[in-house]
Image (cartoon, rainbow, N blue to C red):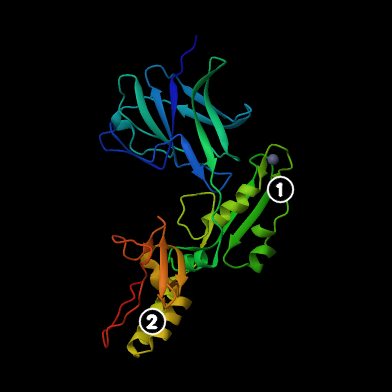
Amino acid sequence: MSTPDILFLGFCSRAEIDRSGARWNVLGLSSILQTYLLPSHLAPFIALSVNIQTLRGTGILHILDQDGVKGGEITIRGQHVEGAELAEEPPDTVTMHPGEAWTPVFMPNGDGIAVPKPGKFSVIQVKDGLEIPIGGFQVIHIEAPPLTADRIAAIRSDPRAAKSMRIQLGCKRCPATYRVYFGLDRDPKLEAEGWRWSPEIQDTEFKCTCGVGTVELRYVKSGLVALLGRPSEQTDLNIVPLYERSALQQVRDKFHDLLNSEPQEERIQRFITDNPILLHMFSAVNLIPKPSIGTKFAADFAILDARGRLGPDRDRASKHQTLETRRAPGAGVDPCI
Ligand SMILES: [Zn+2]
């Protein structure tokens, strides 16, 4: 009977060992991963517990999907070093003080594990020719919310928003690639370089020439729609920013001039509707111009935040909370971009 030297605990978004080498600061540890986009590298760190007394040489872990098909491999090398020897830590290496036996370790995932589809995955340690189960995780695919006009206005209100997102699927063994992009507008230049506009993709899957990799494309298509406009940790994505710094400054200056010209309220409303970036501080998910309140009145804007609440007054959120733009006569207003 062979016992494992490593246990798989899950993934986490951040992990940092403190200066003492004995204590971890960890964020978002879980064995259930929710994602809009697949294939995905899942999370930046892999959480393990390692028996540093018994791990000799190299520990090899395999990731298996529900059908037992191998989807990835992690190699752990344990090495004893004297404190003074380790002047510089090589990448993907974690230095720790030895504990009694089982010690938590959080390894950078790097280009390691990427899963192509949702489902349950098991992790095994391959040791002495045996496969020993040491844990598992589940990947859940989240459907994208529809890209409505209100959501597009909200995306345009975010200075960190993405104008377009690209993902290139490829195989590690052959040169076959499949390039997909999506954005607020189509980009003929990208398409000339071989990037496919995601809503027009007819293929259901990408199969590489050597036959090793098959990726269902529906998770790519819906994932790009969902992630548009969001700051993302997804390292697989190439993101083009929506706003250049100079463009933001231009909007700021024009708004400043407009406010100082004592304009009619409608002109301010029109300017903000055309430049929703001015409402960026409310972190809108939906931005609705001129919503009606009852049958008689209309507010200037309604802002729905990520928690589904109407803003901007987060403390007194109610169904009728709206934003009204007011200008103090003669006062210089800084739109704070
Ligand atoms: Zn291939």
The one nearer the camera, 87 or 200, is: 200
Above-or-below relation of 21 to 276:
above
Above-or-below relation of 335 to 15:
below
The one nearer the camera, 64 or 130, is: 64
Return the disc, 2 or 1, that comes first in the chain's sequence.
1
Q: Is residue 255 left or right of residue 171?
A: left
Name the amino acid, label 2: Phe
Determine the secondary structure under disc 2: helix
Determine the secondary structure under disc 1: loop
Read off the residue under disc 2.
Answer: 255
Q: Is mark 2 within 8 Å of ligand 1?
A: no
Above-or-below relation of 166 to 113:
below
Q: Is residue 80 left or right of residue 240?
A: left
Q: Is mark 1 within 8 Å of ligand 1?
A: no
Q: Is residue 147 left or right of residue 319?
A: right
Q: Position of residue 303 (x, y in %)?
A: 41, 66
Read off the residue under disc 1.
Answer: 204
Q: Is residue 196 visible?
A: no
Give the mark count.
2
Q: Position of residue 2 (x, y in %)?
A: 49, 12
Quarter of the image holding residue 311?
bottom left
Name the amino acid, label 1: Thr
The quadrant the C terminus occupies is: bottom left
